[in-house]
Amino acid sequence: MGEIREVREVQGLGRQAFCDMRGVPKQTLINVENGRNEPSFKVMKKIVDAFPQYTMWLMHEGVNEEAGQISPQIEKARADLKKTGTDTN
């Protein structure tokens, strides 16, 4: 499930840091990120509890920016705009 990798990476977390932060075994995360296993409900709950802004995207591949539900791509684009000084907010 590459989506979890995208969340982890846009948050600037390596695998070990992510696992330590969320209490997920590293091999479990590796297996999920590489598509060997689907994430369990317990693992998904740990992720959405830490990063609630990605819940809709992780569960339904959708976004609702007005409700604060974004994707890692939106987060990255916002960060890039701030770096370049072209952010309009």
Image: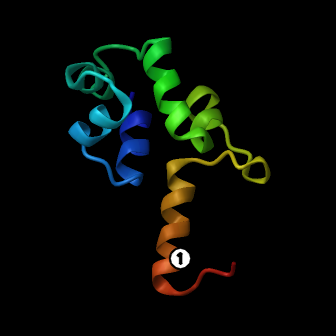
Front-most of residues 34 and 22: 22
Q: Residues within 10 Å of mark 1 (few under 14, many from 20)?
A: some
Front-most of residues 5 and 49: 49
Q: Residue furthest right?
A: 66
Q: Amino acid at mark 1?
A: Leu
Vertically, is 15 above or below 11?
Answer: above
Tell me which residue sits at (21%, 37%) in the image. Answer: 16
> Which of the image's four quarters has the C terminus?
bottom right
Q: Is residue 8 left or right of residue 54?
A: left
Front-most of residues 43 and 10: 43
Q: Is residue 8 left or right of residue 36?
A: right
Total of numbered circles in the picture?
A: 1
Which residue is under mark 1? 81
Q: Where is residue 77 shown, x and y percent of the image?
A: 52, 65
Q: Where is residue 36 shown, x and y percent of the image?
A: 28, 16
Q: Where is residue 2 shown, x and y percent of the image?
A: 38, 34
Q: Residue furthest bottom?
A: 85
- Quarter-wise, where is residue 56 in the image? top right
Tell me which residue sits at (49%, 69%) in the image. Answer: 79
Tell me which residue sits at (47%, 26%) in the image. Answer: 46
Q: Is residue 50 left or right of residue 26?
A: right
Q: Is residue 37 left or right of residue 59?
A: left
Vertically, is 65 above or below 33?
Answer: below
Q: Where is residue 61 shown, x and y percent of the image?
A: 60, 34
Secondary structure under badge 1? helix
Vertically, is 40 above or below 12?
Answer: above
